[in-house]
Each structure stands twice: as C-alpha cells, then as structure tokens.
Amino acid sequence: MKRVLVLGLVVLLVIGSAVVASSQTREWTVYNTENSGLPDNFLTHGLAIDPQGNIWIGTRSRGLAKFDGENWTVYNTDNSGLPHDRVVALAFDAQENLWIGTADGLAKFDGETWAVYDTGNSGLPDNRVDALAIDRQGNIWISTHMRGLVVYREGGVILTGVQK
C-alpha cells in the first residue's frame, strides 16, 4: 500500500517498508535501518508531521521514530511510556499532543509526559487501536480492532459506537 503526504515542496511516501522523500527537484531519498536512525524497515500507516515539521513514523515492532530532518529519536517500551512497540496510528490534536494508537492501547504524548488509555483504566473497549482521527471539535475518533468505533472527548467522556 502506498501513502502520500504533500507539505509545501516536500512529498513523503510510505511504500511497503521505506520512507521516501522528494522535493520539486525530483530527487528521492530512501531512509531505512542501514542509512538512518530508523529503527525498523517494517513501517505501519502511522505517519504524522507536527507543526515544527518533525516527521513521526510508526513501526511494526520497534516503536516510534521522530525525524527532525537531521536527527532521529526513537521511543519504545524501554525508554518511554509507549504501551507497545507496534505503533499503528498517529494524530496531532490542536494542543500539539501526539496521540498514538498501538497494539496494546492508546497513548498521549505532550512532548514530556505520557498518558496511556486501555481497557483497564478507561472506556476503551479493545486495546488494539487500528486508526485515529481528530475532528474540528477536538474529539479523538478511535477505530479498534474488534470492538468498533470509539470517540474520546478531553472532558473525560468516552462513548462507544456500534459493537459486535
């Protein structure tokens, strides 16, 4: 599957297991574990760009990578509050918090602290999060693997959609 993001003059593609960048000069750069700080060549659909231009990349089994154009920072279960190293979905809210969908819960990262939401401490009906989207009102829409759609409102209200 191919995913394309267009930001100004830079185009980012996720093709299979590589991150590729191109500018209008039509030069391509492939980032992988052999030539960068990317921790895994098996990437997920988790790809987001924050307001500062940092690129955040979810991996299948090695956590979350942040690339600022020069330096790579890797967040995983050993060095952060991530609940799982399989990071499948990413979204930024209006306050620039990064919401992270993983195979074992939902994490919120404000740049310093981590909060984790799972079936044990919230109304999340399934720990496996497959997709995230944030609407204009700031509601976080969460697609779970087997338990339907959930909407989270920062006021602490979690409503679940239709479930099987």
Image: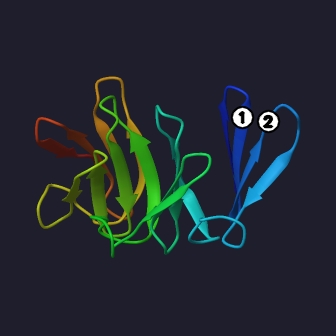
User: In the rendered view, would you say 68 is above or below 18?
Assistant: above
Return the x and y of residue 150 as percentages of the image width and height.
28, 47
Residue that label 2 marks: 23
| 72 sits to left or right of 92 | right
Front-most of residues 105 and 95: 95
Q: What residue do we see at 15% from left, 55% from top? A: 123
Q: Is residue 81 visible?
A: yes
Q: Which mark is residue 158?
A: none
For the C terminus, the image quarter is: bottom left
At x 84% / y 31%, what residue is drawn? 24
The amino acid type, in three-letter code, at marker 2 is Ser
Residues tagged 2 and 1 counted as in contact (Cβ below 8 A): yes
Tag 1 residue: 10
Amino acid on which disc 1 is placed: Val
Examine the image and state in which quarter residue 105 appears.
bottom left
Residue 112: x and y, percent? 26, 50
- SS for tag 1? strand
Using the rendered image of the protein, determine whether residue 163 is visible from the camera's viewpoint: no
At which x and y percent is residue 84?
Answer: 35, 71
Label 2 SS: loop
The residue located at (61%, 46%) in the rendering is 69
